[in-house]
Image (cartoon, grey):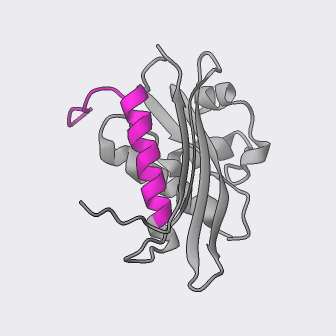
């Protein structure tokens, strides 16, 4: 059997607290953007919401509802570095868990051909205990022998893997329609 190695690289670390309470409802806060790409944080947080909803195993607070509730408390959801503790946010947003994260890399790396590179870290905090119950850090470049992926595709694949790990660790069974 012939195996072809790709040129893309992946680094991944994931952890879930053993025995942590399953997520009843989670608020995905805007991801902090630590890159030069102006909208990387909002792109990645929107992808996370979409991927979590698609699993059907975790209730997700609508981001516009979360923003409205935070604005009523004179908090700016667009500035994750100035938000209060996850416990306080959980109380304000009426959720069991809060997902926070950052985009550490979101660019095309120069070379013979530009290679998309994306790095994301995320953590989930139990809003009752204040404990970090899940964390993940992924970094990936998007090229391989046969094709070159774009930034959006690389980001989506990272977020999909994170969402699947999160729901496997802390999700409930498939949600019933109408709940």
Return the residue found at the far front. 1
Instruction: List the single residue furthest toward the right.
Output: 82
Residue 161 among magenta residues: yes
Q: Is residue 40 left or right of residue 18?
A: right
Asked whether, in this view, residue 123 is left or right of residue 84, the answer is left
Give, as a single range, the part of the protein colored magenta. Answer: 154-179
Residue 143 location (% of width, % of height): 48, 72
- Measuring 65% from the left and 42% from the top, which residue is drawn there? 70
What percent of the width, then of the height, locates residue 53? 36, 45
The verdict on residue 168 being magenta is yes
Quarter holding the N terminus is bottom left
Q: What is the number of callouts on the image?
A: 0
Residue 32 location (% of width, % of height): 69, 52
Q: Residue at 42%, 37% (x, y): give it.
A: 165
Residue 152 in the figure: left or right of residue 39: left
Q: Quadrant of the C terminus?
A: top left
Image position of 52 with respect to 116: above or below: above
Relative to 40, residue 94 above or below? above
Task: Please state which of residues 67 and 16 is positioned toward the viewer in this rendering.
Answer: 16
Q: Nearer the viewer, residue 28 or 122?
A: 122
Residue 94 shows up from this direction = no
Q: Residue at x 45, y 77 (%)?
A: 148
Q: Main secondary structure of the magenta part?
A: helix
Q: Quadrant of residue 147?
A: bottom left
Q: As displayed, is residue 145 above or below residue 173? A: below
Looking at the image, which residue sits at the far left? Answer: 177
Please say whether residue 118 is visible from this viewpoint: yes
Q: Looking at the rendering, which quadrant does residue 169 occupy? A: top left
Residue 72 in picture, x, y percent from top left: 66, 42
Residue drawn at (62%, 64%) of the image: 40
């Amino acid at each position: 059997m012939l195996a072809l190695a790709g040129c893309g690289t992946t680094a991944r670390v994931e952890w879930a607290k053993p025995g942590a309470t399953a997520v009843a409802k989670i608020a995905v806060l805007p991801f902090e953007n630590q890159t030069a790409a102006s909208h990387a944080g909002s792109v990645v947080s929107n992808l996370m919401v979409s991927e979590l909803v698609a699993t059907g195993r975790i209730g997700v607070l609508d981001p516009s509802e979360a923003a409205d509730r935070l604005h009523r408390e004179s908090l700016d959801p667009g500035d994750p570095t100035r938000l209060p503790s996850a416990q306080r946010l959980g109380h304000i947003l009426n959720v069991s868990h809060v997902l926070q994260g950052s985009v550490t890399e979101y660019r095309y790396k120069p070379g013979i051909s530009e290679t998309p590179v994306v790095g994301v870290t995320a953590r989930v905090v139990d809003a009752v205990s204040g404990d970090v119950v899940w964390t993940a850090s992924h970094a990936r470049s998007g090229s391989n022998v046969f094709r070159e992926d774009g930034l959006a595709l690389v980001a989506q694949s990272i977020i999909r893997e994170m969402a699947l790990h999160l729901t496997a660790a802390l999700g409930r069974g498939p949600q019933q329609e109408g709940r």
